[in-house]
Image (tube, rainbow, N blue to C red):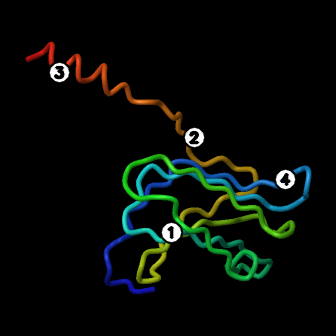
């Protein structure tokens, strides 16, 4: 990781790691409200010795967009991961990572963002009325 580059501008607004009751697999869920210069996310868990290991040998979740649009992500690992702490790292085009977490199993970080449609026509009407 190159420490000389500025931080990656990604804002994580929600995260949770849980076990899917149907499959028994570990599931990562997270949301972002800002993503700039982000290529995707790497997922990690803390092993019994306290070392951070990549999930599924290096799972990488490609970003869905850039800017200030709500993005929701979900990754189901290939099995249950025997760990108590997990993290999500955003990765920029240079391969630099910024880690979010650690998160405990079933711990909720932040809160889900409500998607709301913007009433552009109503905003235009208000602006015209104010002129």
Nearest the eye: 6 or 22: 22
- Looking at the picture, how far across and down is residue 23, in whole percent? 91, 57
Residue displayed at 52% across by 69% down = 40
- Looking at the picture, how far across and down is residue 109, in whole percent? 60, 49
Q: Marks 3 and 2: which is nearer the front?
A: 3
Q: Which of the two discs, 1 and 2, labels the residue nearer the N terminus? A: 1
Q: Which of the two discs, 3 and 1, labels the residue nearer the N terminus? A: 1
Q: Residues within 10 Å of mark 2 (few under 14, many from 20)?
A: few
Residue displayed at 80% across by 61% down = 26
Q: CA distance from mark 4 to mark 2?
A: 20 Å
Nearest the eye: 29 or 44: 29
Q: Which residue is mark 3?
A: 127
Give the total of numbered labels: 4
Q: Which residue is mark 2?
A: 111
Q: Which of the two discs, 4 and 2, labels the residue nearer the N terminus? A: 4
- Secondary element under disc 3, as helix, strand or loop, is helix
Furthest residue in direction bottom, as rendered: 2
Q: Is residue 112 left or right of residue 76?
A: left
Nearest the eye: 34 or 64: 64
- Secondary element under disc 1, as helix, strand or loop, is strand
Q: What is the number of the mark on residue 20?
A: 4
């Amino acid at each position: 990781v190159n420490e000389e580059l500025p931080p990656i501008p990604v804002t994580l607004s929600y995260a949770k790691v849980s076990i899917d009751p149907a499959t028994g697999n570990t599931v990562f869920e997270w949301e972002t409200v800002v993503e700039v210069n982000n290529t995707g996310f790497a997922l990690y868990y803390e092993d019994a010795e306290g070392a951070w290991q990549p999930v599924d040998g290096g799972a990488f979740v490609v970003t869905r967009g850039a800017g200030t649009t709500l993005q929701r992500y979900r990754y189901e690992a290939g099995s249950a991961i025997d760990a108590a702490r997990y993290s999500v790292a955003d990765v920029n085009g240079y391969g630099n990572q910024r880690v979010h977490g650690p998160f405990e199993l079933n711990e909720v970080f932040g809160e889900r963002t409500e998607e709301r449609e913007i009433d552009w026509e109503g905003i235009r009407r208000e602006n015209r009325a104010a002129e």
